Amino acid sequence: SVPLLQAARKKNSLNLLELTEAELEEQFVRGDGPGGQATNKTNNCVVLKHIPSGIVVKCHQTRSVEKNRKIAREILQEKVDLFYKGEDSDVFKEKKASEKQKQERKRRAKENLERKKLFKEMQQLDKE
């Protein structure tokens, strides 16, 4: 089973719950990680909290505060949707579908590998 909040950040989700600005608490903090002076001196990391559910998202993907604000809202919207809808959420369904596709690709690759092994063994027997 997929942990619900880790399934967030998938694209093409249409039926997400709407967030109102009154429900959000926004802060700008210094980011962490690599980046040197650009990271250490600027407050372009966005911390967004959804007050009713208590979900917190921290976004520091770009150097632009505006882009980080937009990305943080998208991520938070998906996480809030997962929080309230659970397994009925489109985000969760997309994650499960992509996992299923990945498993199918793995299975097919394994079958092809087995076929190749058998083919090589047959060739070796024919040569002898």
Image (spheres, helix red, strand yellow):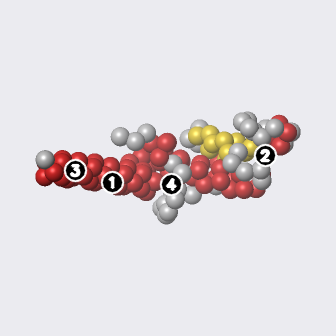
Task: Using the numbered discs, state the Cα–Cα distance from disc 3 to disc 1 in whole angstroms.
Answer: 23 Å
Task: Tell me if label 4 and label 1 are in contact, CB under 8 Å.
Answer: no
Residue carrying label 2 = 44
Which badge, 3 or 4, is on the more N-terminal residue? 4
Q: Earlier in the sequence, mark 2 or mark 3?
A: 2
**Tag of residue 126:** none
The mark found on residue 105 in the picture is 1
The disc, 3 or 1, on the residue closer to the chain's N-terminal end is 1
In the rendered image, the vertical position of residue 54 relative to residue 108, given as above or below: above
* Left or right relative to 20: residue 105: left
x and y percentages locating residue 101 in the rendered image: 35, 55
The structure residue drawn at horizontal position 49% and vertical position 42%, both measured from the top left corner, is: 6
**Side of 55 relative to 30 (left or right):** left
Q: CA separation, marks 2 and 3? A: 58 Å
Residue tagged 4:
10
* Residue bearing the label numbered 3: 120
Q: Front-most of 51 and 103?
A: 103
